[in-house]
Image: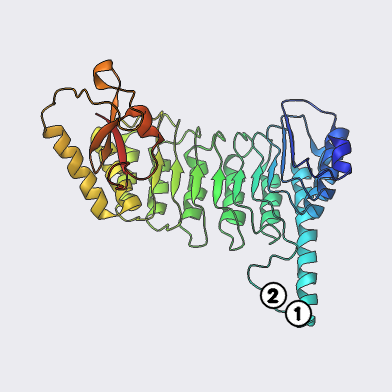
Amino acid sequence: MLKALRNHDPHVQQVVLDGKVLPWQYTAALLRAVGDSPHVWRVQLRKVGANDRIADALRECVEKNTSLIDLDLSKNRLGYQSMHALHQGWYARAQRMQQQQRRRQQQTLVVEDNDTLDACPLQRLNLEGNPLSADALHVLSCALTTGATPNLQILKLGRNQRCGFEGMMVLCQELLCSKNCPVTWLDVRGNNLGDAGIWPLAQALSESSCTLEYLSLQRNNISNEGVAAIAQAMEHNTHLRTLDLQRNPELDDDGATALVEALWHNHTFTKLKIRNTRVNDMRVKNELFDLLVMNTYGPTLAASTKESLQRLQMEPVTAESTAPCVICFEANRTMGHTFGMLLPCRHDNACWACCQRLRAHCHMCRALIVKIMAS
């Protein structure tokens, strides 16, 4: 692989090494070859035993490469020096961008808004499972706000036990609250933040400069107090679309009630994940579902769906139909197959397996599907 990269082989577009421990010299040589290659768009060096010895090679890679979109360095031992190398590489790239822009202005050439000059094409950066301290996160935040990575959208910093309150404070103040922050998808699962680590994040969400659309807080020991802080920030947030609170066992019905109150003021939030928590009150769950459907599809379709559900509960159970599925013509109710009910149109003439393959519209009337339930 290394020889093909050095020869700029156009067939080598991905470098994927997962779970195989490599000498740091070989990993550094791979990164340098990727930096010179114009064809590689994905690099996954996951759990290869990389440490800060590859810092120089990492700097050359991010400074020179013109095609890399996905960089995965998760479950290694990268620290402060590696983050400093990222900062140096992107800062040099930003300086080169400014020089190109000045040169074009001197030549009286118009620079369009969508012209990113020598900007880094990186869109996804995965640093999960690396022991990044608060100082390392400070350098990473400075690196991402230099302006050299305007295309970066997804940032994964989960499973980092060294993050803590200080690291989260640095990340929120210097990255999420910055006007130059390009990140819209943040994953900090498994960092054991607790309610203390959630407070700076809630403060960042309440700022108008925060453009996060997806936030994952799985396995962070968050209780009702932390969720209440997030809910209060959501009342003023217009960017967040998805919030993942799964596997926080201290979250119960009181925290979900705070989210319900926030959704009465927030009309842009559309998806909430609360599996493996202690939210058991069906009244609260139903209210959350109604509000999320209303934010997603509008009040008219949401009311139609709720009315259909109420009618289904009141109607008597009818005899099983012998008609086969109208899509596959194989499944039949009398043979024990489960059929699906499409809401709000209430068509139930397709089996459950075929219903799961349907997209946004009903196969009969082309109505927009809001929910599929077993009939």
Where on the picture, by quarter, is residue 370? Answer: top left
Q: Residue at x 86, y 33 (%)?
A: 26
Q: Is residue 110 above or below residue 182?
A: below
Q: Is residue 40 left or right of residue 204?
A: right
Q: CA distance from mark 1 to mark 2?
A: 8 Å
SS of the residue under disc 1: helix
How many circles with numbers are drawn on the protein?
2
Residue 17 is situated, as x and y percent measured from the top left of the image, at: 74, 31
Q: Is residue 80 left or right of residue 242?
A: right
Earlier sequence position, callout 1 versus callout 2: 1
- The quarter of the rendered structure image containing the N terminus is top right
Asked whether disc 1 touches disc 2, contact meaning CB atoms under 8 Å apart, the reply is yes
In this orientation, which residue lies closer to the viewer: 277 or 366? Answer: 366
Residue 16 is situated, as x and y percent measured from the top left of the image, at: 73, 34
Which color mode does the image show? rainbow
Q: Is residue 232 above or below residue 338?
A: below
Q: From the image, tell me which residue sits under label 2.
A: 111
Q: Is residue 123 above or below residue 339?
A: below
Q: Is residue 147 left or right of residue 283?
A: right
SS of the residue under disc 2: loop
Residue 330 is situated, as x and y percent measured from the top left of the image, at: 34, 23
In this orientation, which residue lies closer to the viewer: 169 or 112? Answer: 112
Q: Amino acid at mark 2?
A: Val
Q: Amino acid at mark 1?
A: Gln
Of all residues shown, which one is farthest toward the top?
335
Q: Is residue 38 above or below residue 338?
A: below
Q: Residue at x 31, y 47 (%)?
A: 366
Residue 232 is situated, as x and y percent measured from the top left of the image, at: 38, 51
Q: From the image, tell me which residue sits under label 1.
A: 105
Where on the picture, by quarter, is residue 174? Answer: bottom right
